[in-house]
Image (cartoon, grey):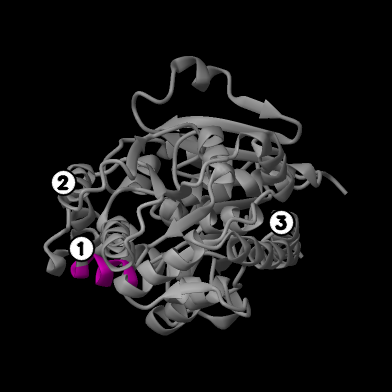
Amino acid sequence: MSQLRVLILSHDYPPRGGGIASFTYYLANALSGKGISVTVMAGSPPGTMKESVLANPTVKKNLEVIRIPRMNLPPSPVWYQTMNLNKLRCLISDFDIVHSQDQTSFPIICYCKKDNPRIPWVVTVHGSPVSELYYAMKSVASGESEVREFLTYVIGFPLWDLGIRVEAKLADALVPVSQEICEEIREEYRVDEKKLFTIHNGVNVAELENIARANANHQSKTEVVNLFYAGRLYWRKGILHLLKSLACMTVNFGFTGYRLEVFGEGPLKRRISSLVSKFGLEKNVKLRGFVTRQELVSAMARSDIVCVPSLYEACPVAMIEAMVLARPVVAFSRPFSRELLSGIPHAAMARSIEDYAARLYSLCTSEDLRTELGRRLRKQALDRFDMEKIAEKYIQLYSNLLS
């Protein structure tokens, strides 16, 4: 049997990019490690891609990463496609399977299904347009929204909504990354049950363990508890809620023996700096901005507690990475956190800012509690989110579609 050839389409891919980029990175490497020929067509905003990269794509054993241009403006997935339409259409006929991430398949799937109707398309769905719209509107109501979020999820809703409807009609398989997203897609878009396959995100356990070992001797020996946050600095990610929780912990418990490192860039950066000053947290909070992926995961490995204050996620890769690294995670009780942390005794899921502060304080003041929760989280991650297992599920799906 000839080697299976898979084309993965993603508008983001490391060294830059968020959860979708990380997921694509982990999946591509896992599939190539299992003998599948993988080509990733990765979008790169201006200033992050040199001409030499286009001429000489990154090539590993069974894995090729080709960088193609896109604009760093919403809607990124659509710019990724429209700027490279002919290139994508020409490439697709060389592969057995096309696997696109979220909205990187519309409108390109319309053309390619017409040109090559027999090539199966798999679309991994990382979010629901309806929920994205809901939380964007909540951010507007909060008075703490920002223009890009409004443009992307409110003004852009008809485009994302149409994209899901077209994918539901033309794709051979839709793969929501959580059961919650799967149920939303099923209810909102009336997708054929035979096309829906829930497969969680996963991470490379061995790679994370190597990073953890490399940083084992660099963990803080001081009495200060190191807190970690990573994500785009906008309302839905909960960074403002986290700062309010820290202020609440300081006032309600009189605890200041912590240091929060905030990794990421975004439109709320000035607002964050203002709140840090308002709450008197200048000595406790440090804004680190954008760093390389290696630096980011290394900082997570050295931390004592990972904060995931998001109000909406699908299946956050960063949270799974923290679990594999046995870092205790503090989150709000949301559908995504309940799904990832189900069955873990005493999982730190808060129902309010005050509750978040209390749970954070409990972990900050008990190393034994941090160790025990980290151990439980790691076991859950190894059982459910190891990319080696996730990749096998995708391989089985590819095989079923081809047969």
The residue indicated by pointer 3 is 391
| Rendered residue at 33%/72% (across/down) | 131
* Mark 2 → mark 1, Cα distance in angstroms: 26 Å
Specify start and end residues of the magenta stretch as a single range: 131-138
Q: Main secondary structure of the magenta part?
A: helix
The answer to if 394 sits in the magenta stretch is no
| Rendered residue at 44%/70% (across/down) | 359
The residue indicated by pointer 1 is 154
Q: Which residue lies furthest to the right in this view?
A: 1
Give the residue type that dot 3 points to.
Answer: Ala
Question: Which of the two labelled residues, at mark 3 and mark 2, occupies the earlier sequence position?
Answer: 2
Question: Which of the two labelled residues, at mark 2 and mark 1, occupies the earlier sequence position?
Answer: 1
Question: Which of the two labelled residues, at mark 1 and mark 3, occupies the earlier sequence position?
Answer: 1
Image side of residue 234 versus residue 32, left or right: left
Image side of residue 36 versus residue 304, left or right: right
| Rendered residue at 26%/42% (across/down) | 282
Which labelled disc corresponds to residue 325? none
The residue indicated by pointer 2 is 274
Count residues near mark 3 (Cα–Cα under 10 Å), then give few for <14, some for 14-19, many for 20+. many
Location of residue 14 in the rendering, given as x and y in whole percent from the top left corner: 52, 37
Image side of residue 116 versus residue 265, left or right: right
* Mark 1 → mark 3, Cα distance in angstroms: 34 Å
